[in-house]
Image: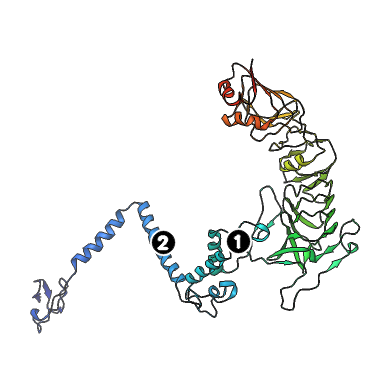
């Protein structure tokens, strides 16, 4: 037996109560007119099908872009939810951390209602302080203040990492980035009971052979950086000073640049031997403008990290005592080994020798350029066969620098030129060279911008001895203030420009 659907006309089994074609009831007891037919949203189905079809037809790049865009929108939504979520003024660190630990208002004297308001308050606080940093440091920029405010609100005090400068293996510099530091005189405590009494110890209980050396903890300013201390300034007036290895049980991990700045009485500085092995970082120019400093003794049982020229403008310094596998001192020179090469790291400005011959095991001396030029006894430098020369010219007492068999340089009468494939470039014309005349070599290039020699009176330029630029021609008289005569080959390609720029200042002779 079968029957016919009264709605769509399909043939159905007699026992069927629903038409599978149109999904309408078809009981005999109900009329088709009394049962409403379902309404299908054909347009919606078609739209959805069209969307999936278009997505399927997209290229991989477009699909990836769409996914990234969706992810960015979701992340922005989550960030907004995080920033603008209500805060609990009693417990939330974003509120507690604002305004130096005091609950700060969001414009009305009350606590911030959300993290966005807390960040704004911290930024206002940082920018309102302004002014110069401690000891004349550069003021914090607005961008730095904003970044610090976000860090403080979102994650609180960040732990300082460790970084190592280029060329310093096996030694890690303590980093102060992102850490909360407190400057205080040594010997003080953070409790409310007040500072402890400064501790003064005679030299008998400390390292160093200098009689009368003292370790006075009250003579130091420092910052605490997590589990290490950075000595920022020595404030005492002692002639023989012992530098502490720890303060209040915390290791001294760094001596800041110019910690000893202008210490007129200082004669010897002795780093106290470490009670337990730790890193000690000594910045460049840690000893600066100490006119009577004669000797520095570095500590033992310490992983030393010494930056180039640890002592600068110290005209009496002649001796450095050090016992470490990466450092070596001999004949006024401090050398550093980077596990591949030896470098001249510092030259004692008070070491009394008229010559410095670079050992054949040393790769470069340019890290101690200023030291070499500040030494008033030093007259001549002799490079080794593979050594790199000092980097810059300086008005100094140096009379000559000689390349010998070094293939990287050419010297002519003590004037140093750097070799290139097709020419040589003037590098150093010693400020103490007393010759009154000099002839530039063939195929040479010069700029003269950083030179200074007051003895030269006559300079000769062959046709292939060229200036790098018009500025080089202009700088000639400034570099040699007593220059009177310039002899120039008639075939020199820059002759007309030389005459137009220098004829009013020099006697130009064309040969």
| Residue 270 badge | none
| Residue 131 badge | 1
The quadrant of the image that shows the N terminus is bottom left
Q: Quadrant of residue 202?
A: bottom right
- List the residue tagged with mark 2: 72
Count of numbered labels shown in the rendering: 2
Residue under the point 70% across and 34% down: 452
**Relative depth, front residue between 9 and 277:** 277
Cα–Cα gap, marks 2 and 1: 39 Å
Q: Position of residue 168 (x, y in %)?
A: 70, 50
Q: Position of residue 84 (x, y in %)?
A: 44, 72
Residue under the point 56% across and 58% down: 141
Residue under the point 59% across and 24% down: 498
Which residue ends up furthest to the bottom in the rendered image? 29
Q: Is residue 407 visible?
A: no
Q: Quadrant of residue 382?
A: top right
Which residue ends up furthest to the front in the rendered image? 504
| Secondary structure under the numbered disc 2 in the rendered image | helix
Establish if 493 lies above or below 204: above
Badge 2 or badge 1: first in the primary sequence: 2
Q: Are marks 2 and 1 in contact (CB under 8 Å)?
A: no
Label 2 neighbour load within 10 Å: few <14, some 14-19, many 20+: few
Q: Position of residue 6 (x, y in %)?
A: 8, 75
């Amino acid at each position: 037996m079968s029957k016919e659907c009264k709605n769509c006309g399909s043939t159905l089994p007699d026992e069927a109560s629903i038409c599978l074609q149109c999904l309408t009831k078809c009981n005999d007891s109900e009329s088709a007119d009394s049962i409403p037919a379902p309404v299908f949203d054909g347009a919606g189905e078609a739209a959805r099908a069209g969307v999936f079809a278009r997505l399927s037809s997209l290229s991989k790049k477009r699909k990836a872009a769409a996914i990234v865009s969706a992810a960015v929108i979701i992340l922005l939504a989550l960030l907004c939810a995080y920033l603008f979520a209500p805060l609990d003024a009693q417990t939330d660190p974003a509120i507690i951390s604002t305004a130096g630990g005091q609950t700060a208002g969001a414009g009305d004297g009350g606590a911030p209602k959300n993290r966005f308001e807390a960040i704004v308050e911290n930024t206002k606080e940082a920018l309102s302080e302004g002014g110069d940093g401690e000891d004349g440091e550069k003021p914090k920029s607005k961008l730095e203040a904003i970044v610090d405010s976000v860090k403080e609100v979102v994650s609180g005090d960040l732990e300082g990492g460790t970084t190592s400068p280029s060329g310093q293996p096996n030694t890690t510099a303590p980093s102060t980035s992102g850490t909360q530091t407190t400057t205080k005189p040594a010997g003080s405590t953070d409790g409310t009971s007040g500072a402890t009494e400064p501790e003064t110890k005679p030299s008998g209980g400390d390292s160093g052979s200098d009689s009368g050396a003292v370790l006075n903890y009250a003579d130091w300013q420092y910052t605490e950086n997590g589990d290490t201390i950075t000595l920022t300034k020595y404030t005492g007036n002692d002639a023989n000073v012992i530098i502490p290895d720890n303060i209040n049980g915390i290791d001294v991990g760094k001596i800041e640049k110019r910690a000893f700045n202008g210490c007129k009485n200082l004669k010897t500085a002795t780093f106290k031997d470490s009670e337990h092995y730790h890193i000690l970082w000594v910045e460049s120019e840690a000893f600066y403008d100490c006119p009577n400093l004669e000797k520095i003794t570095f500590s033992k049982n310490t992983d030393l990290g010494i930056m180039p020229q640890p002592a600068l403008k110290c005209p009496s310094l002649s001796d450095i005592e050090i016992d470490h596998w990466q450092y070596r001192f001999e004949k006024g020179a401090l050398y550093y080994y980077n596990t591949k090469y030896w470098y001249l790291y510092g030259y004692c400005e008070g070491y009394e020798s008229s010559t410095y011959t670079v050992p054949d095991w040393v790769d470069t001396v340019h890290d101690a350029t200023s030291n070499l030029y500040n030494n008033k006894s030093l007259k001549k430098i002799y490079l080794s066969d593979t050594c790199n020369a000092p980097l810059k010219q300086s008005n100094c007492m140096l009379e000559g620098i000689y390349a010998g068999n070094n293939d990287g340089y050419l010297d002519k009468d003590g004037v140093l030129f750097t070799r290139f494939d097709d020419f040589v470039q003037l590098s150093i014309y010693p400020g103490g060279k007393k010759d009154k005349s000099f002839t530039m070599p063939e195929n040479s290039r010069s700029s003269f911008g950083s030179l200074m020699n007051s003895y030269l009176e006559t300079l000769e330029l062959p046709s292939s001895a060229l200036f790098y630029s018009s500025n080089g021609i202009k700088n000639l008289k400034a570099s040699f203030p007593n220059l009177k005569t310039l002899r120039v080959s008639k075939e020199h390609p820059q002759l007309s420009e030389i005459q137009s720029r220098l004829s009013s200042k020099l006697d130009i002779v064309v040969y």
